[in-house]
């Protein structure tokens, strides 16, 4: 008797499947288009995708797209940069100094769960109704997740490498710059992925309160008029923004972390 | 430069790991330290290089380090401890950069040539085999021109064939230019191949049980030499019971 040995080793390994993600998008949009055209989905429930696209073209042609997008992008860039730079610095300090850790970790844990949107009125009082309060809100929201991701990443740097640096008599600053920071980079970048997404959410929230231009203001205006086509056009802009940022970090990771096995 | 241990005792909390060790590490010779697992041989090496402070006793440097020595006590680690984000050349440069030397490039080129790594200067650690990684670590250690090399089971992470090749490399390096080394290992074959003197430690708390001197010049010690095999047999007879007892011990961590 000779039975073939059954194969039991399949599955559980992440496979890279090309194009499936895009296919899901296309399928959903096609379904919405078909549903709204046949009347299966009423025009009140969901705008027709082709109409949303039409609104988009209109936005582009009138120049309104950039009128809204540019202020949003600059707010995002300024706010997220401030938050990320401060977050990485504080996170590295917590990772390196016992006093910073003992003093700041409870504070970070206390401000992490506060919905930062709730603090917007406070920021308006502190920084004025202008851009500064929006920067502050976005920066504050990016700051806490970045801190937590950074100090966890610093904690995870291979101790044997630090010991090696000490045994060769490297200066403290050299060890931080050449061993700790590059070693923490994978963790910092994956933390940044999360904090930048939070930054987009807060950007919209900030623009919904007191902004004339900006994607958030545009969505708020469309929403209050129940103009679903424009509302969806705004939401699509945000999605595209998120996907673009995530892609940019992916590119950065591949460049900076080429050394990873 | 010689190293000297004066009645060193070391404890971790209540556990005594090393007891009353007095030992001299003569220069330009390789001193091997063998002993059953957990006998504190790696701790001894950390004490020698100043990565830990002994609970009692002292570690002393006798004499001055040679001229051009950038880091007198230099380690070679079991797990290589290479920075994965730096190339072979960059890993060697790491230990030189702080000294701001004018001839940094020349030093790197020299040590890479001595360890036959010149062709791999631009490779990342992930591209290298285990044996090559350890050669990079040896090149890095040579770059600082150490007075004493402290080698912590440098070949233990490698397969037995690579181990043979690297032992030949080490013998070659030593015969061309004798260096001082403390070589910690649990592999008795390595000890009799590379050691001028072999210090046998007892199980925890580690004490010096015996010091064996081997006079055969390093380059004449071949694989399978009967005299060396006899020495290895002798070492094993010293260690056998200790190793068995150490193996049966419960750990209180």
Image (cartoon, rainbow, N blue to C red):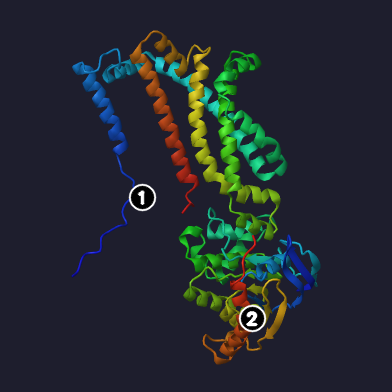
Q: Nearer the viewer, residue B168 or A206?
A: A206
**Which corner quadrant of the image does residue B180 belong to?**
bottom right
> Do tag 2 and tag 1 residues touch (Cβ < 8 Å)?
no
Specify the farthest residue to the top: A225
In this figure, which residue is indicated by the disc labeled 1?
A: A12
Q: Please name the residue shown 59% across and 68% down the image.
A: B138
Q: Which mark is residue B195?
A: 2
What residue sits 62% from the left and 80% below the top? Answer: B241
Q: Position of residue B253 (x, y in %)?
A: 64, 60
Label 2 crowd bin: few (<14), some (14–19), many (20+), radius 10 Å: many
x then y, percent, for residue B73:
71, 66
Comparing labels 2 and 1, the label whose residue is closer to the camera: 1
Q: As rendered, which of B95 and A16 lies closer to the eye? A: A16
Residue B167 placement: quadrant? bottom right
* Image location of residue A8, percent across then percent down: 30, 57
Look at the numbered disc 1 and give the secondary structure of its residue.
Answer: loop
A220 to the left or right of A38: right
Whole-percent x, y for residue B196 in the image? 66, 82
- Which labelled disc corresponds to residue A204? none
The numbered mark 2 sits on a residue in which chain? B
């Amino acid at each position: 008797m000779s039975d073939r040995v059954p194969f039991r080793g399949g599955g559980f390994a992440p496979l890279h499947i090309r194009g499936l993600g895009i296919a899901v998008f296309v399928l959903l949009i096609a379904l919405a288009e078909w549903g709204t055209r046949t009347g299966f989905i009423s025009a009140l429930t969901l705008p027709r995708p082709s109409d949303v696209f039409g609104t988009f073209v209109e936005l582009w042609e009138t120049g309104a797209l950039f009128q809204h997008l540019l202020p949003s992008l600059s707010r995002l860039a300024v706010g997220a940069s401030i938050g990320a730079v401060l977050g990485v610095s504080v996170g590295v300090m917590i990772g390196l100094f016992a006093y910073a850790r003992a003093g700041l970790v409870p504070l970070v844990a206390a401000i992490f769960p506060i919905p930062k949107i709730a603090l917007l009125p406070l920021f308006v009082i502190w920084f004025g109704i202008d851009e500064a309060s929006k920067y502050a809100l976005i920066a504050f929201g990016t700051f806490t997740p970045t801190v937590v991701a950074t100090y966890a990443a610093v904690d995870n740097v291979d101790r044997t490498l630090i010991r090696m640096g000490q045994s060769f008599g490297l200066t403290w600053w050299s060890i931080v710059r050449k061993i700790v920071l590059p070693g923490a980079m994978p963790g910092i970048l994956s933390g940044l992925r999360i904090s930048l997404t939070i930054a987009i959410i807060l950007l919209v929230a900030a623009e919904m309160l007191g902004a004339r231009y900006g994607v958030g203001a545009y969505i708020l205006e469309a929403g209050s008029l129940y103009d679903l086509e424009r509302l969806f056009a705004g939401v699509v802009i945000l999605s595209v923004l998120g996907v673009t940022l995530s892609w940019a970090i992916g590119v950065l990771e591949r460049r900076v972390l080429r050394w990873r096995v | 430069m010689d190293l000297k241990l004066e009645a060193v005792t070391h404890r971790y909390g209540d556990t005594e790991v090393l007891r009353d060790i007095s030992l001299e590490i003569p220069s330009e010779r390789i001193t091997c330290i063998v002993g059953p697992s957990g006998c504190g041989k790696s701790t001894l090496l950390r004490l020698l290089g100043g990565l830990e402070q002994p609970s009692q006793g002292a570690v002393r440097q006798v004499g001055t380090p040679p001229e051009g020595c950038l880091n007198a006590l230099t380690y070679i680690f079991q797990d290589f401890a290479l920075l994965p984000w730096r190339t072979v050349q960059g890993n060697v440069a790491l230990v030189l950069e702080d000294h701001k030397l004018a001839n940094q490039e020349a030093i790197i080129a020299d040590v890479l040539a001595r360890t036959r790594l010149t062709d791999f200067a631009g490779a990342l650690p992930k591209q290298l085999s285990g044996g090559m990684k350890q050669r990079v670590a040896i090149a890095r250690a040579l770059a600082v021109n150490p007075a004493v090399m402290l080698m912590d089971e440098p070949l233990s992470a490698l397969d037995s064939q690579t181990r043979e090749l690297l032992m030949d490399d080490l013998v070659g390096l030593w015969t061309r230019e004798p260096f001082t080394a403390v070589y910690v290992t649990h592999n008795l074959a390595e000890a009799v191949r590379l050691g001028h003197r072999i210090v046998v430690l007892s199980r925890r708390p580690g004490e010096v049980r015996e010091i064996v001197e081997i006079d055969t010049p390093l380059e004449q010690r071949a694989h399978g030499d009967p005299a060396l095999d006899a020495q290895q047999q002798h070492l094993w007879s010293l260690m056998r019971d200790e190793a068995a007892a150490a193996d049966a011990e419960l750990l209180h961590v």
